Amino acid sequence: MSRRKEQTMKEKLALYFIMGSQNCPHKNPEEILEQALKAGITMFQFREKGEAALISQEKRQLAERLQERCRAYSVPFIVNDDVDLAIAIGADGVHIGQDDEAMQQVKKRCPVHFIIGVSATNAAEANKAIKEGADYVGVGPIAATRTKMDARCPIGLTGLQRIRKQLGNSPIVAIGGINHKNARAVREAGADGISFISVLTKAADIQGAVNLLKL
């Protein structure tokens, strides 16, 4: 990846909002995303997973509505795990985990312009992802989180620093348990960007919540 492309990716990862309908059962996800976009998020990931998640056509319809909002603000729309859906709706990219479809297969199936992100919990996984062509690595979980029931043990700031040292300048976004209290420390530990779910889906003031994450 060229230095310019690397820098552009890092800028996109700065404030990375992740959400699915299951994360806001008593709120309208479209309204939450609209407010988040106005507040200044730089990338959005549609992560529709879990017991209460939508499936089939309902999932696609929600994805398309959220994608429209992102396009209006020129914010990349990434689909978590579901490569078929990402390709079908013309998303900007896809994010896969260690237990999802293999990176090589994903790259073969996706358009050349697709942003491909990969989750990693250690330096070996992160290095492998970059070598196989990932545009960025989602590193974590940094701290304990209740939002993702399948989350692994937290790696902490030390684990993040270790991965940053191994990856050099490759784009990294920190994931898991990040809020306004630890956002700055996470960046100082080596993350180019931070990702978050409940810090916005549960916020009474989304603009205020995003402003605090920027500090």
Image (tube, rainbow, N blue to C red):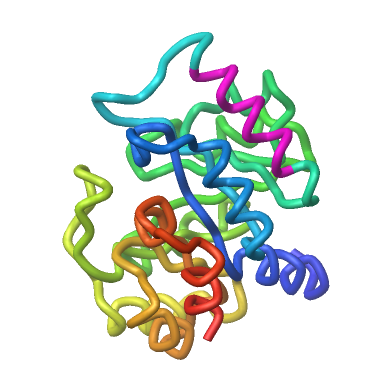
Coordinates of residue 200 in the picture (x, y in percent): 43, 57
Coordinates of residue 64 in the picture (x, y in percent): 66, 25
- Residue 185, located in which quarter of the rendered image? bottom left
Coordinates of residue 5 in the picture (x, y in percent): 79, 66
User: Magenta stretch containing residue 65, yes or no?
Assistant: yes
**Side (left or right) of 37 relative to 95:** right
Residue placed farthest to the front in the image? 204
Task: Write the residue at 73% across / 33% down.
Answer: 68
Residue placed farthest to the top in the image? 57
Task: Write the residue at 34% across / 35% down.
Answer: 26
Task: Write the residue at 52% across / 86% down.
Answer: 215
Q: Nearer the viewer, residue 202 or 194?
A: 202
Q: Which span of residues is magenta-colored?
A: 59-70
In terms of secondary structure, what is the magenta stretch mainly? helix
Task: Write the residue at 63% across / 64% down.
Answer: 39
Coordinates of residue 10 in the picture (x, y in percent): 66, 70
Q: Relative to 26, is 75 above or below?
A: below
Q: Relative to 148, is 41 above or below?
A: below
**Side (left or right) of 90 relative to 23:** right
